[in-house]
Amino acid sequence: MQFVGKNKLIFFLIGILVIGGIWYYAPGFFPKELKRIEQTPVVPPYKYYVIQDEATGTVLMYVSVVVVNVGDELVTDTGKWYRVVRVEGNIAYARQFEKQQDTNRSNSE
């Protein structure tokens, strides 16, 4: 019976040493103060952009949250795909194009 008591005491002391080591070394792994990353919001130079069809001049969309750039794509409610080809001030001109089917998709879906 004394042998079992010694094993418990040894495991208890080892546990105390492990917990003490974690207590002592853990603060070095974590920063005392988390640094905040200061982000300045990107403010568009215009309150809104107008995206027009390049060929007909038809207004396709008004965008007020993000900056419109050349290469941006949009889909109309009729399913036509457009890509912005130039931006002049707050007016973006888009050209219609045919969207290619994704050939990587399996037909079993």
Image: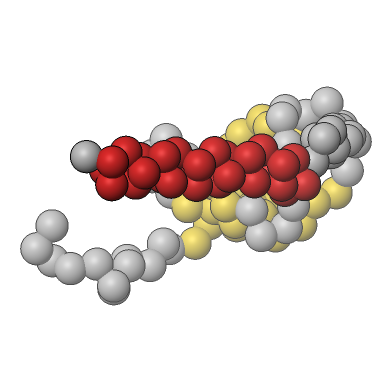
> Height in image: 69 above or below 103?
above
Q: How many marks?
A: 0
Q: Position of residue 73 (x, y in %)?
A: 57, 52
In percent of width and height, residue 68 lies at 73, 45
The residue closer to the viewer here, 19 or 59, is 19
Name the quadrant containing residue 78. Answer: top left
**Is the residue 73 above or below the residue 33 in the image?**
below
The colour mode here is secondary structure
Quick check: 9 left or right of 95? left
Tell me which corner region of the image, top left, top right, bottom left or bottom right, holds residue 1: top left
Image quarter hosting the C terminus: bottom left
Extreme residue in the front direction:
2
Identify the residue at the far left of this view. Answer: 108
Quadrant of the rendered image containing residue 6: top left
Image coords of residue 39 (percent x, y): 85, 36
Which residue occupies the foreground of this view, 84 or 45?
45
Q: Give the residue displayed 24% in from the left and 67% down from the top.
A: 105
Say whether residue 50 is visible: no
Residue 25 seen anywhere in this rendered image of the structure: yes
Which residue sits furthest bottom?
Answer: 103
Q: Is residue 34 left or right of residue 106?
A: right
42 or 93, nearer to the observer: 42
Task: Look at 50% across and 47% down and name the residue there.
Answer: 14
Write the residue at 72% across / 42% down. Answer: 24
Q: Position of residue 37 (x, y in %)?
A: 84, 38
Nearest the eye: 94 or 55: 94
Q: Compared to 94, does 33 lie above or below?
A: above
